[in-house]
Image (cartoon, rainbow, N blue to C red):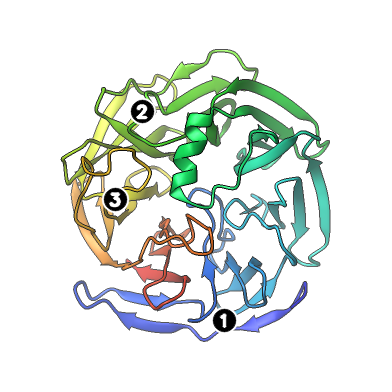
Amino acid sequence: MSLGQITPLAFQRTVDASTGTIVTQLTPNGSVCHRNYFYQKCFTEDGNKLLISANFDTNRNYHLLDLQNKNAIQLTEGKGDNVFGGFLTTQDDALIFVKNNKQLIRVDLKTQEHSVLYEVAKGWVGYGTWVPNSDCTKVVAVEIKDTDYMSLDSWEKFAQFYHQKPRCRLISIDLKTGQRSTIFEENIWLGHPLYRPNDDNTIAFCHEGPHDLVATRMWMIDESGDNMRKVHEQDDDESCTHEFFVPDGSKMMFVSYRPHMDKRQLCSVDAQTLAFKVEAEMPACSHLMSNHDGSLVVGDGSGTPVDVSDHDGHTIQNDPNLYLLNLNTGDIRAIAEHNTSWTVLNGDRQINHPHPSFTPDNKSVLYSSDVNGSPAVYLASL
């Protein structure tokens, strides 16, 4: 299949047996389809079109799914798409994604014309998810020295990479000029770079690795490279993960958990003062994302974490539910069962993670699951 190819889709609706929620499967069984990373923009502002990854052909490429016309148009082709890190621009006119860990590319949504915005310098590799500022004029990113880099196609390699202490640099890229600015560079594994919404001066990033080995996961730094600060002082037995900024920029939220405990905590810090708050005690959700002001949060129940060194101490029962947390009322309820397997597929550690988030109107939750045998994209009605 090639650029501009349109694939018709037959949506399948079911009713969740335990909650009565209407669940719509948007992509077909037998294909490998999933959503992008949970804090990257995937819906157009009107909520009618959705960015997905799909291998309707041999390669997993980006497609724009039209929810009204029930079809998907192909936006990229060939091998090498970073199929989790891509995002729609604030202006809804383009997809921006990384190709072959080397090129940051803009794709016009109307014409599928490709333009290279930035090329990774020789000797470096573009790693992970690259995230825009609110105006979509810059992205913050991580690059890794090519002599240190390895393909992280298993959780064993994930742990190995942490101990290797790769040379990483946190960078900002101007999307108009392609100019790169290095914010911070160190022999430590860096990940999850984020611009604070509506505040280009504040950048967050993490020290990546097995959660129970990383002493301080979350950090903030000024765009100039000054004023590096810890987001949260972790207790000795505390693991933190899956931090994100509330879309209005007011808070950073994250998951906190400890050994020999079934439940987890949804925590937050004020994005400016770093004042800490436990927002909710919750089931063992792995990924969470909020609505615009942080009053509603969706999470995916999970099982024993694979990204820890002490598997025995963190062993828990698998929880197959999606949860809605109302932080104004304190109410937590199951939305539907996602029933994903969480398994690594063809060397992809993320492909069977639900990564739930809200639709723009907060009336449904988007997620991925392989409940029907292959990864697919779903909407659960609220």
The reply to whether callout 3 and callout 2 are in contact (CB within 8 Å) is no
Q: Quadrant of the C terminus?
A: bottom left
For the point 24% across and 49% down, the residue is 284
In the image, taking residue 323 as reference, residue 254 lies left or right, namely right
Residue 235 in the image, given as x and y percentages of width and height: 26, 23
Q: Is residue 357 visible?
A: yes
The numbered dot on residue 70 is 1
Residue 269: numbered disc: 2
**Residue at numbered disc 3:** 285
For the residue labelled by badge 2, is the local secondary structure a helix, a strand or a loop? strand
Compute the Cα span from label 3 to label 2. Answer: 19 Å
Residue in view at x 51 percent, y 77 percent: 27
Q: Give the mark, 3 or 2, whose residue is nearer the N terminus.
A: 2
252 or 164, nearer to the observer: 164
| Relative image position of residue 40 (x, y in whole percent) | 55, 50
Q: Secondary structure at mark 1?
A: loop
Q: Earlier in the sequence, mark 2 or mark 1?
A: 1
Front disc: 3 or 2? 3
Q: Check disc 1: other Cα within 10 Å, few if <14, some if 14-19, many if 20+.
A: some
Residue 332: x and y in percent read: 20, 53
Position of residue 71 measured from the top left corner of the image (x, y, whole percent): 61, 80
Q: In terms of secondary structure, where does tag 3 sit? A: strand
